[in-house]
Amino acid sequence: MLQNAPEMSVSGKRVLVVGASSGIGRATALALAKAGACVALAARRMDRLEDAAREAGAGAIALACDVREPSACESVVARTVEAYAGLDAIVYATAASALTRLDEASADDWRLAFETNVVGAALVTRAALPHLLAARGRAVYLASIAAWDRPPRLGLGLYMATKAALEKMIEVWRAENRQVGFTTVVPGDTLTEFGAAWDRASIDAFVKDWAARGQLYERQMAAECVAAEVLHALGCAENVAQLVVLPRAP
């Protein structure tokens, strides 16, 4: 009879959460702080980030980081290590993408998606790796069920391409560094601010198409549901390669 892997406490763990100003990243940072972890919250929007850090409470710090800037990826890890005298885990929860057909996507659209969703994850991981190896730590990345949709959801081609690339990249990080627990968390549709800047008319048109193709889930999950699975990956005694979190009707 299979048994669930025992949990380890995340209390006292030193964790950097990138993309912590909103959505799943923010929910994860707050959940970690509530569980007793020392949390560095990183993102571009410092006003939102500082609010989240205040909510997280004593021991949490807010660090400005634009993952499209290589020096920022190096700096945010260094500042976290300086603040906490080490690093036990990273959570990469930031993401960006235009909503567009591929034949209408610009070079800037491609750069935004890949630099944010893939290159930024690689640079943060590279900077954190020596510390994660020393701590035999964990690294968790937010993928997306959208990359698995067959047929693909039209309009999300950039997003799907980068999330598929992220998953493959994490497989290689895992193969190269067996002492670190690398996990991809693959959530279904989640209620966040992602896509808030998308054109309303484009959203309506694409959502209508998704509905006609039967590509909409029955509901959207709360960010806190996904954050709970991130904490499970960080606190599980076994290294968890992948967790899939899908919404289900009540």
Image (tube, rainbow, N blue to C red):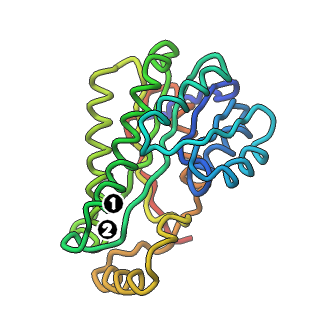
Picture quadrant where residue 29 is located? top right
Foreground: 18 or 213? 18
Q: Residue at 28% of width from left, 38% of height from top?
A: 169
**Residue situated in front as seen by the camera: 30 or 83:** 83
- Do the CB atoms of the residues marked 2 and 1 lie less than 8 Å apart? yes
Q: Is residue 55 left or right of residue 232?
A: right
Distance between the alpha carbons at the discs numbered 2 and 1:
5 Å
Could you tell me how many numbered marks the image carries?
2
Q: Quadrant of residue 125?
A: top left
Residue at the extreme right of the image, as rendered: 58
Q: Residue at x 43, y 27 (%)?
A: 181
Residue 37 in view of the camera:
yes
Say above or below: 120 vs 51. above
On screen, 139 above or below 165? above
Residue 82 % position (x, y): 63, 20
**What amino acid is found at the position of numbered circle 1 in the picture?**
Tyr
Helix, strand or loop at label 2? It is: loop
Residue under numbered circle 2: 156
Look at the picture and state if 130 lies above or below 96: above
Compared across the picture, whether 213 is left or right of 50 comes to left
Amino acid type at image mark 2? Leu
According to the picture, the residue beneath numbered tag 1 turns out to be 159
Counting from the top left corner in percent of width and height, residue 224 is at 62, 54
Whether residue 1 can be seen here: no
- In the rendered image, residue 64, in percent from the top left (x then y), is placed at 60, 42
**Mark 1 neighbour class, 10 Å CA radius: few under 14, some 14 to 19, many 20 or more:** many
SS for callout 1: helix
Say which residue appears at 60% left-offset and 18% top-offset: 86
The location of residue 237, given as percent across then percent down, is 52, 25
Q: Residues within 10 Å of mark 2 (few under 14, many from 20)?
A: some
- Please identify the quadrant where the C terminus is shown: bottom right
